[in-house]
Amino acid sequence: MTTPLQQLIRAFGENLDIRTADQRRIDEIYGMLTEWLAEHYEGRVDLDIYPQGSFRLGTVVAPSLDGGQFDLDFVYLRNLQLGSITQEELRVEVGDQLTTACEHFGWEDPIELGRCWRLDFFEEGFHLDVLPSIPDDRVENGIRLSDRDLTDWLYSNPIEYANWFYRKMSEREQRLASATNVEIEEVPEFPIRTTLQRVVQLLKRSRDEFFGERSDAPPSVLITTLAAHVRPPDLGVAEAFHQTVSVLDSAVEQRGDEYWVANPAHEEENFADKWNGDPRRREAFHEWLLLLQSNLAQLTVAATDARKFDLLEETFGDVAASIRPEVREANRHNRSLAARGGALAPGEELIENLVPVELTDQVYVGLWIEEAGEDEPEYRPLGQLRRRRIQKRRQVEFRVASTTVAAPYEIWWKIRNHGAAAKKESSGDGLRGQISRIDERVRCESTSYRGEHYAECFVIKDGVCRARRRTWIAIE
């Protein structure tokens, strides 16, 4: 008999792995950027650009409906000797190059963070983090990373770390992974996930559900390293996950007064370094791990399927809710929701359950934002704003610009909130998803909850939905 956990793992292919269309769009934008940078620097400097992190390892987890994005990291390696350029000089240089590239392609300006420059493609559902670096000549493929907030360069070695990660797989798993090996500068694709990759995905999804928007969540590389150290070989995913969780923290070393999870590709890099500076981070890690261990233990003895699904949903969030029979049936006609692994909000309505849907036409919707600081409120279209992420407590309007549906017709709206802030709404309707049958070309809303939400417009003619358009909005 297939257990709920095994059903969840099987559903990962639909709900947590990156979809082919998303992979192709990331490949396209990544290729455009790297080619532009290579051409710009041709004849002047030796520049290497390559992916690192979860995309390289095959452990990327699709963002939840609580407001996440795909996060693609890549190394921007200037082949310069240590001491020939400062961290600040390198960051400024990389920022200038990325700003020029964004102007060329019509993208949003890059945003400087601590260790990277971020290119935010909100409408595409992902962002690129560009890490300025120089070589570390003491270690094969080693690099030194710039950090805006630190005096010293950081150590890293993403290429050799990935090689170590694949060596931790069984021979069979290595053969599966090697079928999709690509050149360093390309973004790899993984149509088949190995047991180790799935175990890491499960851990990361559980981490995301537990910590939400908290800043003390353990980094993915820490979780990935511990899992690769302790994951038992030659077991199915469900069994391997259970055993990995039971001993996950056993690979943490204590060196004097410090906790250490060494980078296996660069012993001077400690993935648990923030635990030593802030003990609350280690306590938060164990709080999450203990709850995960408890939920898995209860899952094995739960008497009813309903209880098992409740435990899975508490542990893994919406992706687990999507395997409930009633939710799978509700999502059967709502492909866009099902594709993102979404569960329905309490009281949420689907247009397919209200009227027949025959999409023969188009409708175009503009998003207008109230300008801050104006005595008389003035609205501007989203495209005129520098940032696509909107502040809280702002007024927005979703305006029907045009439709190919011949008059007469009615305009209906659905506002769907997501995220931890909406879930905590005391009135219980923060996650709302009801459909308003009031005919109106403009829908006015206020930005109340942090996260990613959408308004969906339906054009109803003669009792049939002839056009629909979903407009996403990200609130800071």
Image (tube, helix red, strand yellow):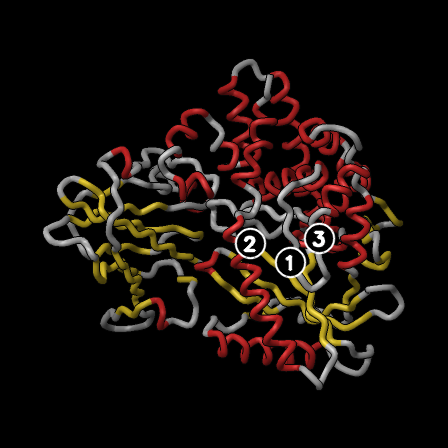
Mark 2 highlights which residue?
A: 23
Q: Is residue 134 left or right of residue 8?
A: right
Which residue occupies the foreground of this view, 472 or 401? 401
Secondary element at image label 2 = helix
Residue at 89%, 68% (x, y): give it: 138
Mark 3 residue crowding within 10 angstroms, few (<14) / some (14–19) / many (20+): few
* N-terminal-most mark, 2 or 3: 2
Residue furthest to the top in view is: 303
Instruction: Name the residue beneath numbered marker 3.
Output: 278
Which dot, 2 or 3, sits closer to the camera? 2
State the image coordinates of residue 404 (x, y, percent, origin top left).
Answer: 20, 57
Q: Look at mark 1 in the image and give the residue it sits on.
A: 187
Residue type at numbered disc 3: Asp
Q: Is residue 243 above or below residue 285?
A: above
Residue 385, image x, y percentages: 38, 71
Vertical arrangement, residue 343 with respect to residue 395, above or below: above
Q: Residues within 10 Å of mark 1 (few under 14, many from 20)?
A: many
Q: Is residue 475 above or below residue 205?
A: below
Residue lying farthest to the front in this orientation: 179
